[in-house]
Image: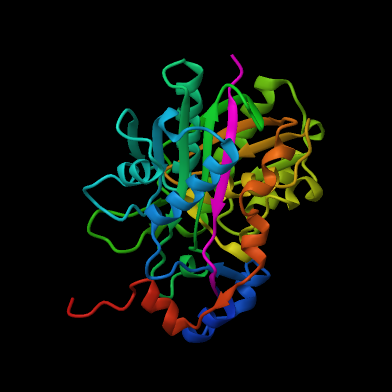
Amino acid sequence: MTVGIVGYGSYIPRRRIRLGDIAAVWGTDAETFERGLELHEKSVPASDEDTITMSVTAARRALARAGIDPSSIGAVYVGSESHPYAVKPSGTVVAEALGATPAVHCADLEFACKAGSEGMFLAATLVKAGEVEHALAIGADTSQGAPGDALEYSAAAGAAAFIFGTSRLVATLDAQVSYMTDAPDFWRREYMHYPRHAGRFTGEPAYFKHTLGAAHMLLEKTGLKPQDFAYAVFHQPNGKFPMRAGKQLGFSREQLQDGWLSPWLGNTYSGASPIGLTAILDKAAPGDRIFMVSYGSGAGSDGFVWTVTKRIDEVRAMAPHTRDQLDKDKLYVGYGTYVKLRGKIRMGE
């Protein structure tokens, strides 16, 4: 049975803050982040935007491209590390908003930055097992970074949604793998407002060990080589890491360029590599192969191989393109507005 993506959609908030404006407040050198990590600006959610609202918008766009009855969706998985409620699922709100209830399996997923790809892995597997006709997987985050911390320069917001099925596919899923170890490079306890991280350890060995490990597993499983792919996309905690990982594996900058969004979007955590995939699908031609590897602190990576079908040309115009959301109608805010929108001004605590 061939399983793949029936519809996809993304959402990126219009508001942005330039890294130079953050650096000016904390007296740091913006070039450290712009040159060293290849970051320039990041998305900022409005006061009425959160993981749920972004998930609903991205999922509705995926439905528009899928052209299916939402009641045929038998599973909804929302992967995020910034669910609005500590006790109440995000997925039930999303499923209700889409019209997928009540005959639907629902779960909120967490695995740091790979919670979105975790949902994709499960959704595709459930469809392949024949348990449901369609399954929806979403990666969405309004990422947290403590004031003045290095994460504040990259922690951004966005969402990507994918509907899986066995017919009317825009991309087939040819292979998937997972690679995981207990590598504590990033964490946040229940009572903490912001996550903590292990500094340089988050890159090597955490990010690169797992990303490259999953990538090698995927290449070995499929028998393919980097030159067999038109595109590749990796998790993007910054602009430098995915390019370095891709080049170490043998992918060219041209193969990586279209899914490389972090310099202008920031790190959308659970949505990072999935949003990159949506940008590639907006451009890819029938027959193109796409190599995708996510990464989540804690730590693990999911890897996927996709092949684009002829139906992609029919659905592209049915929802906003990711690059257009990234580049058009941006609203820049200053640091004061940013901390207000992100709830970083805490009174009476």
Q: Is residue 115 magenta?
A: no
- Measured as percent of width and height from the top left, residue 218 is found at 64, 27
Is residue 5 left or right of 191 when viewed as pictured?
A: right
- Residue 177 in picture, x, y percent from top left: 56, 27
Of the pair 255 and 100, the residue shown nearer to us:
100
Name the image quarter holding residue 173.
top right
Q: Quadrant of the N terminus?
A: top right
State the extent of the magenta-drawn residues as a range.
1-16
Task: Choose between 143 and 150: the one closer to the eye.
Answer: 143
Q: Position of residue 117 (x, y in %)?
A: 50, 38
User: Can residue 18 be seen in this snapshot?
Assistant: no
Q: How many marks?
A: 0
Name which residue lies at 68% across and 45% down.
Answer: 316
Q: On the picture, is 102 further left or further right than 256?
A: left
Q: Quadrant of residue 74?
A: top left
The image quarter containing residue 348 is bottom left
Q: Residue furthest left?
A: 348
Q: Residue at x 59, y 32 (%)?
A: 5
* Residue 123 locus on image (x, y percent): 46, 29
Residue 19 visible? The answer is: yes
